[in-house]
Amino acid sequence: MGFYNIDRVFHLVFLIILLSFNSKLSYSEVNKTKSVFFHGQNYYISIPNGYCDISDTATGKILSNHIKAAQKNIKIKTPEVKLIFANCDYILGNIYPWGYVGMLIKEQNFSQKLYNEVVSKLFSNKNLMQDLSEITNKALDKSMNTLYGENRANSDTIQKPEIIYKDNFSVIFRSFNSGNFAGEFIKEVVVGSSTVLRESIINTYITNEFGKEPNSFYLAGSLIENSKINYNLSLD
């Protein structure tokens, strides 16, 4: 599934960035559809409503590099990161909610319906999900230590994983992350979607601070609508 997310690993770096940049970024033009190259072809990818592509910003690069570092430590197949996004007017000291788009090669011919059934069975397998959580925790802690010298992150990812919606365009899932960074305890809610296309699977994730708005069901609604757009874009 590839629902691997990061804690607020970039806050110390932001303290440096804030010294040299304005505290707020403003996007006067919003391009909702981005072109990305994956596995030999171009795809048009929709970003959820209210968000902008920040992949080429300092913040976006920090997030992208950390996700990729954690994925290398996981050593199992994970989505290739293609876009990092955040609110179009986000504050550098607080990136939440933010998200990313990752893509997987579709190695066999299967429908969204069948994929939804398989994912639902995986999420209901508590032992499997616990094993996956432990693998992810170790990978995240290792990357935190390597990149930031954070020796006691004590990551606890993929808590209470559950499927919250599925239709002909996507399966929507939710889980929770927690951990320590620079002496601060962080808890997050992660909502993700997977949309099956002809030759690939688009995975979109949004992470927010636990207990903060927008809540997970609002985020799920955004992903439901965005998944329909991504599916229709693949037909063009």
Image: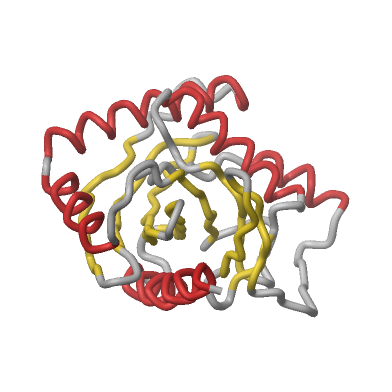
User: In the rendered view, would you say 49 is above or below 97?
Assistant: below
Give the quadrant of the C terminus.
bottom right
Task: Point out residue 115 in the picture as x, y percentages from the top left corner.
Answer: 25, 54
Please state, as top left, top right, bottom left or bottom right, where the N terminus lies in the image.
top left
Residue 88 in picture, x, y percent from top left: 67, 71
Q: Residue furthest front?
A: 109
> Compared with residue 201, is residue 52 higher up or lower down, i.e. above or below?
below
- Most foreground residue, 68 or 77: 77
Q: As displayed, is residue 1 above or below residue 201?
A: above
Residue 113 seen from this side: yes
- Label tally: 0
Which image quadrant for residue 221? bottom left
Q: Is residue 213 visible?
A: no
Q: Nearer the viewer, residue 220 or 81?
A: 81
Residue at horizontal 50%, vertical 72%?
235
Task: Quadrant for residue 135, please give it.
Answer: top left
Q: With 174 as the anchor, is 69 left or right in this view? A: right
State the image coordinates of residue 155 (x, y, percent, origin top left): 38, 33
Residue 96: percent from left, percent from top: 54, 60
Going 67% across and 65% down the picture, which residue do you hit?
A: 34
Colour scheme? secondary structure
Q: Is residue 120 left or right of residue 27?
A: left
Nearest the viewer among 213 and 28 is 28
**Which residue lies at the image location 19% right of the left edge and 50% below the top edge?**
118
| Residue at 25% across, 45% down | 159
Left or right of 56 on screen, residue 53: left
